[in-house]
Image: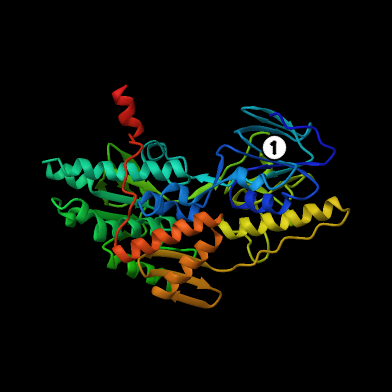
């Protein structure tokens, strides 16, 4: 890896998500040799991935180079690598570019899409956990429309123009709203020779309501917004299979659709090497104590989505969203500094700042304690918070400019197929 020897303790962070970045920013100028490892050379602002896939933002608007974070310190290093194993006995990490030892190890690998063992969905559905996947989804949607405009087969055209989303959490709701706004405000001008009354958007949810982690008030409001945008919602329904563009469910519902987007759940992304009993089986996350130490290890920590910490307020662990990850990263930085100075660490306490989701233009829902907002004011709060937490001034400026442009002109400027996408089965058939 070509990391120089240092008399300073070496702290290795695996993962450049919200938790890893928060930790690195706090420690970048402290008396440690800091090494950040990630398989990408950028941090992704995941809450806005859906805007990349729906052509509202370009990918560089929500990505920030990890090297720009670590370059601010004299003893900080970044390596683009994929970690393959951790050896807690020898205190070494194995990667695809070599091994590295550590004094402190922080695992912040986040989460990956959970297909719940359904191989047909995993093989054929679209997911949206990173920038390449968001770009693939954007390309597929636009390619389907390009095919729809030239086909004379009515059934095939409807199949190409039918979008099915599985999972009505924040990702599913925001993505469904984004596609609906494309259909309402943008696509008819791009494709004047197409009838967009044929374009269908179906949101399938296994539970009794959309946005189940939020309040019933916000769920009801979000349902109203989605229906106003023409999204068809199917509750108490689960996708069973997806093969040959046919979506089947556990009910009588079946849909012939060229696009199925899977947003029905996530699971932790652990690293081989640590004993499996350290994982909380239901979510594949490392069980940690109140100091974010993985149980049984004083020098190995887990933060963010990969960390499972039971508390009185969160008996099932903290929600797998940005705020707990950021707060754990900041708190662990303070604890490591305390530890380096021979002081006792302090337990982590999560401050819940609320939850929010946007459905579209002037349509959002916000829960802050007992306060519930919906509509334009909630949408304004949602925009302000997301701009505030974007990493980097340039990203904030570019995103704000795009939002203002889109709002004034009812337009989205990034409807480009720059990397054509083919589904896996189509590629295999061609080969």
In which image quadrant can residue 256 be found? top left
Considering every residue shown, the one lying at the far left of the view is: 152
Q: Nearer the viewer, residue 297 or 153?
A: 153
Q: Is residue 378 visible?
A: yes
Tell me which residue sits at (89%, 53%) in the image. Answer: 342
Question: Residue 37's spot in the image, x, y percent?
Answer: 64, 39
> In the picture, which quadrant includes the N terminus?
top right
> In the picture, which quadrant includes the C terminus?
top left
Indicate left or right for 332 with 382 as reference. right
Tell me which residue sits at (50%, 62%) in the image. Answer: 386
Q: Which residue is mark 1?
A: 274
Q: Nearer the viewer, residue 212 or 53?
A: 53
Indicate left or right for 271 with 384 as reference. right
Question: Residue 173's spot in the image, x, y percent?
Answer: 39, 59
In which image quadrant can residue 235 be found? bottom left
Considering every residue shown, the one lying at the far right of the view is: 342
Tell me which residue sits at (26%, 63%) in the image. Answer: 230
Q: Is residue 317 visible?
A: no
Question: Residue 195's spot in the image, x, y percent?
Answer: 15, 54
Label 1's element?
Answer: loop
Question: Residue 57's spot in the image, x, y percent?
Answer: 40, 53
Considering every residue shown, the one lying at the far top of the view is: 431
Indicate left or right for 3 with 141 as reference. right
> Would you place residue 345 above or below residue 88 in this image?
below
What kind of colouring is applied to the model shown? rainbow
């Amino acid at each position: 890896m070509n990391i120089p020897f240092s008399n300073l303790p070496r702290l290795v962070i695996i993962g450049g998500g919200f938790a890893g970045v928060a930790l690195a920013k706090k420690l970048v100028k402290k008396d440690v040799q800091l090494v950040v490892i990630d398989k990408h050379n950028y941090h992704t602002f995941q809450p806005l991935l859906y805007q990349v896939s729906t052509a509202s933002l370009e990918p560089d608007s929500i990505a920030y180079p990890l090297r720009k974070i670590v370059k601010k310190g004299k003893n900080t290093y970044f390596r683009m690598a994929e970690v393959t194993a951790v050896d807690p006995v020898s205190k070494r990490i194995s990667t695809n570019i070599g091994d590295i030892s550590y004094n402190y190890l922080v695992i912040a690998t986040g989460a990956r899409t959970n297909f719940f063992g359904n191989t047909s969905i995993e093989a054929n559905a679209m997911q949206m956990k990173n920038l390449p996947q968001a770009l693939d989804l954007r390309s597929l949607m636009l390619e389907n429309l390009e095919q729809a405009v030239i086909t004379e087969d009515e059934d095939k055209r409807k199949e190409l123009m039918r979008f099915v989303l599985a999972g009505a959490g924040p990702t599913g709701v925001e993505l469904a709203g984004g596609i609906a706004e494309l259909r309402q405000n943008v696509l008819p001008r791009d494709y004047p020779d197409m009838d967009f009354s044929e374009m269908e958007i179906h949101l399938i949810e296994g539970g009794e309501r959309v946005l189940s982690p939020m309040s019933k008030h916000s769920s009801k409001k979000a349902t109203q917004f989605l229906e106003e945008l023409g999204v068809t919602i199917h509750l108490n329904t689960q996708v069973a299979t997806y093969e040959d563009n046919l979506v089947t469910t556990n009910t009588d519902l079946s849909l012939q659709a060229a696009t199925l987007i899977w947003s029905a759940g996530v699971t932790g992304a652990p690293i081989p090497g640590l004993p499996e009993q350290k994982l909380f089986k239901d979510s594949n996350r490392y069980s940690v104590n109140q100091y974010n130490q993985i149980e049984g290890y004083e020098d190995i920590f887990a933060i963010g989505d990969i960390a499972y910490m039971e508390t009185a307020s969160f008996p099932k662990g903290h929600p797998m969203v940005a705020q707990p990850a950021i707060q754990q990263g900041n708190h662990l930085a303070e604890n490591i500094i305390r530890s380096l100075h021979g002081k006792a660490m302090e337990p982590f306490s999560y401050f819940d700042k609320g939850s929010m989701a946007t459905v579209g233009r002037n349509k959002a829902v916000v829960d802050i304690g007992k306060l519930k907002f919906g509509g334009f004011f909630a949408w304004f709060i949602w925009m302000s918070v997301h701009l505030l937490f974007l990493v980097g001034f340039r990203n904030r400026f570019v995103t704000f400019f795009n939002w203002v442009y889109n709002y004034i002109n009812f337009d989205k400027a990034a409807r480009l197929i720059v990397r054509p996408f083919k589904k896996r089965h189509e590629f295999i058939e061609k080969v």
